Amino acid sequence: MKDFFEIRWHGRGGQGAKTVALLFADAALATGKYIQAFPEYGPERMGAPVQSFNRLADREITIHSSVENPDVVVVLDQSLMNSIDTTEGLSEGGVIIVNTVKKPSEIRTLCKIRKGIKIFTVDASKISIEEIGSNKPNTPMFGALVKATGILDFDKMIFDTEDKLKKKFKNKPEVVGGNVKSIRRAYQEVISE
Amino acid sequence: MSNIVAKTGNEAMAEAMRQINPDVVAAYPITPATEIVQIFSTFVNDGKVDTIFVPTESEHSAISACIGAAAGGARVMTSTSSQGLALMHEILYITAGLRLPMVICEVNRALSAPINIHCDHSDTMGSRDAGWIQIFSEDSQEAYDQTILAMKISEELFFPVMVTTDGFIISHAMSRLEVFDDKEVQSYVGEHKTPYNVLDIDNPITVGSLVLQDYYMEIKTQQAHEMMKAKEKIKELYADFNKKMKRNYSIIEEYFMEDAEFAIVALGSTAGTARYLCEKLREKGEKVGVVKPRIFRPFFAPEMVAILENVKGIAVLDRSDMMSSTGGHLFNELKSSFYRNSKQPAMKDYIYGLGGRDITVGDIENVLKDIKDFSNSKETTPDVKYITVRE
């Protein structure tokens, strides 16, 4: 039925869930896709649960409602899974990618995730602390997403993203290298069951 | 450089403003339109435009400053939303009454109370009688293109124009945008045209004078007649834009209407969601279509009737209410348009999405089911239904 691919990002205010959705859309556009990226605008507070969304397709996307049945859910902060059903609406055969120190099998048991949903995990916080110098799990999770879904060509994506980050951080060029490295590392380190 | 970029609705409108390079922008920020002037002010700061940017202390002052600049022969633009447009209200009438060209990038948002920052069309509909041309945009691409087109319409017809997007749904959603080169836009909008220039000291004139029982009636009748004539000219200007800028816009967009038995009529972003649904239903053989008026003022009544008169049922989606017990703005326009028409399809209003309440494909599918039942029944009332609401 659906002719586009939908992603829901869960994060906490300040973790960059909106930024990474925009970054991902921009990278997908560069590979020739039609894209949408939009955040859910509730009360914006540091640390509060927030969501953002992506749609990707090979043709024009005319639907403008929010994402109800994502194909992929990305969780930037595992602690959100204690209070929110992050798999809500996730379609059968869907994918959830979690930033955590735990293995996918541990997450399945801990969060009671049903069979039929594929779980990927990566310690994006650790990667970002080591590569960027602070806990900014959003960009590494972008790398994990590309690996888990295979939706974008990684080399093309990383080339384009580096270019975009250079423009975005004109005044802080030192952060570009760390971000790019963290995307690469998460791409390599993400694991499934 | 590629002309395909990823931009939000607000970024798209700010980009159109940069390429138009107006002489004066006077503005006051308001959610969700703030980014438009915020981004534009960085263009001013970075010397990317020649515009004089006037930060004012209110929207009332912003549009007043725009009027002064326009009367002095400047090309002017501003941007606002919701309470901001409401605060401009009295000056909107003055802009139109003075026949000054001006473009407002307006982001549709609910009006208080209760306070709400999200999308509905109450703000724009509240100014529908002010003598402005009102253009709705489904997405960022339309917002970008129609902002450029609006500048032309405004200066060719000497009517102020507001171009709207849906707050957050479009204003803050990033999507694929095909942009023009700066030169193409400059060449399209061309030399600034102004009806008069109050600073032309060789030809002194009075602007904004007192006109009582003696001539007010004539002036207002002329303004109304000019709006009637504007309809044909707007069609020509859309055709001209398509030709020069290689786009394909009509004043009323029709999807699958050739043999449609049931039609959804919607403004702005919801028309896109409805179109997606209709594509899916067409695959199943259901004869459903979508009609999207791009322009609400002036209202293209005979054109709407011609498109819709052969269907069995029309479901009008209204993202605003008139609080009159007779439904929303689009419904009332369309109902009036069908008065004394020989064919009278069933018509029902569905008021939805106030204050940003989401409208899904499933919600619109329910509307289609309801309009089919309504069309088949002998009942003619109630013909207004509030949907996407807790019962």
Image: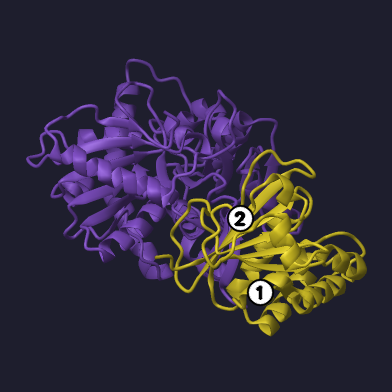
Chain colours: A yellow, B purple
Q: CA distance from mark 2 to mark 1?
A: 16 Å
Q: Is residue B190 visible?
A: no
Disc number for residue A87:
2
- Please report whichever mark, 2 or 1, sits nearer to the chain's N-terminal start: 2
Tell me if residue A122 can be seen: yes
Q: Quadrant of residue A95?
A: bottom right
Q: Is residue A114 left or right of residue B275?
A: right
Q: Which mark is residue A148?
A: 1
Give the image location of residue B88, x and y in percent: 54, 30
Q: Is residue B374 above or below residue A63?
A: above
Q: Is residue B23 above or below residue A54?
A: above
Residue B85, numbered circle? none
- Considering depth in this image, is B1 or B341 the residue closer to the camera? B341
Does A28 sit above or below residue B100? below
Q: Is residue B19 left or right of residue B146?
A: right
Q: Position of residue A52 (x, y in %)?
A: 64, 54
* Chain under disc 1: A
Badge 2 amino acid = Thr
Quadrant of the drawing holding the C terminus of chain A:
bottom right
Q: Report the residue at 41% width, 28% height from top.
A: B391
Outermost residue on the top side: it is B213
Residue located farthest toward the front when viewing the structure as drawn: A109
